Image (cartoon, grey):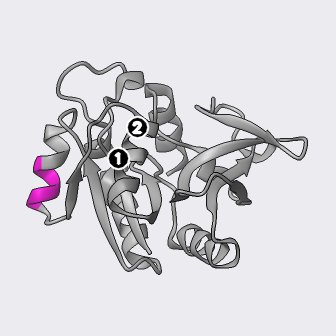
Amino acid sequence: MIAIILAGGKSSRMGWHEGGEKAVTKIDGKRLIDLVVNSVSESKVADFIVAISDNTPETEEYCKSVRYKTVVTPGDGYHDDLQYLLQRYPKFISVACDIPFLRREHINAMIDAFSSHCISITGAVPREIVPKEVIPSYTFVHEGKELVSCGINVVTSSKDSIPFLFNDPLLGINVNTPDDLRIAEKHC
């Protein structure tokens, strides 16, 4: 299975208008994209590709400079880009470029879960263990429990999907806003 690192968004929640792309933002001296690539590279994935768009010219330039493979998506939004990618890749692990605390173990667990279920899987963390100062971008309820989507998913064309729970509070931190960036820096 391959991993596709999603790095083609507009970073609009960061409040940046020009010259601010989330993937190349640094935390603790390291670019977000490099933190994610390191974890992906150490995992069981066969290969990885970085999904970029016209929204992310600085990210594209950086990826070329470090020789990360890229694929250009429309950049019209998360779901639209996933549908576009599914037309080219029938199954893959999608990883948001803004998960600073992602580890290879998280990715490997998702691959193992897919081997058992063969349907789409959403990585999640119980809301109750995520640091209180974090305001999640997306939560959902499963079996009466509020879960925080953590930006790592197995994507397939299956209509069915199951959550995969991680017991790692820091995995619930996605850098989507300036506050998220400060929180992530605090936890580094």
One can see residue 113 in this view = yes
Amino acid at dot 1: Tyr
Residue hosting label 1: 84
Helix, strand or loop at mark 2: helix
Magenta region, residue range: 61-65
Query: Could you say which quadrant of the image residue 38 lies in?
Result: bottom left
Q: Residue at x 17, y 28 (%)?
A: 19
The picture places residue 104, in percent across and down from the top left corner, at 50, 72
Q: Is residue 36 left or right of residue 31?
A: right
59 left or right, relative to 80: left
Dot 1 falls on a residue whose secondary structure is helix
Residue type at mark 2? Asp
- Residue 72: horizontal and vertical position, in percent? 21, 48
Q: Which residue is mark 2?
A: 80
Does residue 3 lie above or below 31 as drawn? Answer: below
Q: Quadrant of the N terminus?
A: bottom left
Question: Residue most toward the right?
Answer: 144
Point 22% across, 32% down: residue: 55
Badge 1 vs badge 2, beta-carbon distance below 8 Å: yes
